[in-house]
Structures are given as C-alpha cells and as structure tokens.
Amino acid sequence: MTNDITKPLANAVALSVLALSLGACALDESQSQVQTPPAVTVSQTGPCCGPITPAARNILKVLDESDVENLWSKHRHVNWETGVPDEPADYKGREADTHCSALAAAMGERVGVYMLRPPGHAQELLANAQTAWFDSTRGRKAGWYSVDTPEQAQALANMGKLVVVSYQSPDPHHSGHIGIVRASDRTEAQIRESGVLMTQSGERNYFRVSERAAFKWHPGAWPNAVKYFAHDVPAQ
C-alpha cells in the first residue's frame, strides 16, 4: 500500500526536477549566445581609441563606395539594399521620407551582418524598431551587443566591428535615426565636443558627419538619448 502511494509522488518529483533542469539548460543556452563587448582602452591624449585596423578599413571602403550622397535620397521611395529609386519621382505613398535605417541595413548586409530590415519590418519608422531590436533578446541572439560610451563605440569601430549609433523617438509616430560609426583618429576631446563620426542617410546624406550634426534634426537625441550597438564582422 505504501509503495502505491509513494510511486506517483516520486514520479511527480522526478518530472519537476527534469523540468527545472531543462529550464536551466535553456537559460544557459540563451545566455551563451549573448555577446559581450571586448575590452577597449581609451587614451586621453592624441587619438583616443586605438589604431584603425585593416578590418576597419574594409568597412570604411564599403561605406565610401556606397554612393550615399547620391542614393537613399529623401522623399523618394527606394530599394532599401541599393538606395536606387524604385517609384516615380512624383510618388507620394508610404516609405518615401528619409532612409537612414535602410542605408544602415544595406551596409550591414554588405559586410555580412544582419540587422532588422525589410521584409522583417517596413522601411517606415524602421530606425525606431531597429533601436529596440538591437537591445532585445532577438538582437542579442543575432550577435549585437550594447556599448556604453561613444569612446568605446569609436574604439570598436577602429577594431573592425560594425558599430551603429541610433535613436528611438519617444513618439512612436515620429521617426528615429541611425547611422554607422566610422573608424577614425578622433581624440577624446573631439568626441566630447561633437561625438563620433558617422556615415548616414537622412535629411542630408553624408559619407562623414559628426553625431552632433547628424542628430540636429532630432531635438533631445544627442548626446543623452542616443545608443550604441556593435557586432563582430565575418572575415572578408
């Protein structure tokens, strides 16, 4: 009689232990996929953020060959990957405002790094969605990690990581902004004064522009509301 009572109890305990073990394994697997930023050293004299590596120069080459100053033009509907207009000039429909997020996604694709992009999300309000996605479980599992400071972001870009600086508008109906951090020899003082250098599409398209200038169309964004994220780049 005692055995008949204790067997179901023992089975229930065993199942509970198994469930807890599986949950722990799933947690360990999820945590193992989260990337952590490599250690960086920031100098207070001269160029702050380390030498520009060959890997970083490869990314600069991709950015400089993008023809961003002539493509991803505002008020045109464009192919997000190429920046080439794909609707008539008088098109007045959706996704024809500015294209910072499309450019960022296209540059990521060209160096082998995924970020949220069509068809996973429409081009409209994509920068807001990308900023939230980078910091989400899906973004972290895709290899993105948060970077604390602009100096660290600059150092990682100089190492050859793909680094973005992005802003999510507090109004979900207004666009945010995003750009690619360029490898550069900026000093800590220059970064404090005007931020890292970016390649961007937006109200104006630039191969090379400071954060302060890039985010001037988004009051309240720079320096306190922008975020930095980085991703390792596959060997080319």
Image: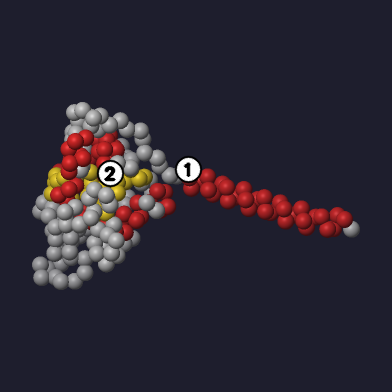
Task: Name the residue rendered at 58%, 51% in the picture.
Answer: 23
- Asked if one can make out residue 63 in the rendered structure from this viewpoint, the answer is no
Query: Where's residue 163, x and y in %?
Result: 27, 44
Residue 19, image x, y percentages: 63, 53
What colouring style does the render use?
secondary structure
Give the position of the C terminus as an image quadrant. Answer: top left
For disc 1, the neighbor class at 10 Å (few under 14, some 14 to 19, many from 20) is: few
Question: Could you tell me which residue is drawn at 15 percent across and 71 percent down?
Answer: 92
Residue 104: give x, y in percent of width and height.
Answer: 24, 51
Seen in the picture, residue 157 relative to 84 is either above or below; the reply is: above
Q: Residue at x 62, y 50 (%)?
A: 20
Residue 5 visible in the snapshot: yes
- At label 2, which amino acid type do we have? Val
Element marked by disc 2: strand
Q: Which residue appears farthest toward the right when viewing the image? A: 1
Q: Position of residue 81 (x, y in %)?
A: 22, 55
Tally of marks: 2
Marks 2/1: CA–CA distance: 21 Å
Q: Residue at x 18, y 65 (%)?
A: 96
- Residue indicated by mark 2: 163
Amino acid residing under circle 1: Ser
Snapshot quadrant of residue 122: bottom left
Residue behind mark 1:
32
| Secondary structure type for disc 1 | helix
